[in-house]
Amino acid sequence: MKDYVVDDIKNVLRPRLGDDVPLLLFRILRIIGMRSILGETSGATLYMMGKRVGNMLPAATMDEFAKTLQDLKIGIPETRIVDEDHINVRLYECITCAGFGYTGEMFCDMESGIIAGLLENVQGKKAKSTQTKSWSAGYEYCEFEVFLY
Ligand SMILES: [Zn+2]
């Protein structure tokens, strides 16, 4: 099986439909489709997938980190450096959970992984991200604690 990279897949030729898809379709695939196929392991699998994706995307500075997340419409990040190995990331308008009602469950694992992967590129260290807040847990943003090691 071939390992595709971003350059292999970025050419979109859809003269009538263009290169946007409805966010609803993304959420059907992401929240319903992937979770139902992957079951209990969906969180870990989506996190690992997100991390790989984050590592493939360009980000050499914290500004580029924010720009990449915003350009891909994953969300609007607000970062706070807690200490040299700890970064707090609030994600507004999260692609997966913004607007979601309370379920008590958090499932933005792919976004968590993308954030960790991008921050690895920026910081030149390994990163582990854990989601701590979400629309589905009663907040109006997503939040991640990222530890560098
Ligand atoms: Zn989210």
Image: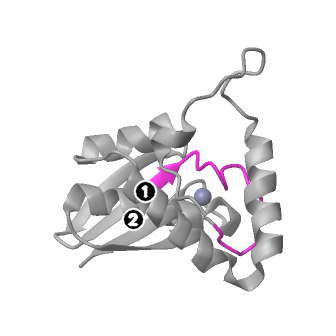
Residue 99 lies in the magenta-colored region: yes
Q: Nearer the viewer, residue 75 or 117?
A: 117
For badge 2, the amino acid type reads Ala
Q: Residues within 10 Å of mark 2 (few under 14, many from 20)?
A: many
Residue where numbered disc 2 is placed = 116
Circles 2 and 1: CB atoms closer than 8 Å? yes
Front residue of this view, candidates 52 and 138? 52
Q: Vertical placement of 65 versus 14: above or below? A: below
Residue positioned 58% across, 45% down in the render? 93
Please report the residue visible at 78 percent of the width from the left and 55 percent of the height from the top: 29
Task: For residue 133, say whether it is visible.
Answer: no
Badge 1: few (under 14), some or many (20 or more) residues near its Cα, within 10 Å? many
Q: Is residue 144 above or below residue 70?
A: below
Task: Tell which of 101 and 121 is nearer to you.
Answer: 121
Main SS of the magenta part reads: loop
Label 2 residue SS: helix
Query: On the rendered structure, is 29 left or right of 125?
Result: right
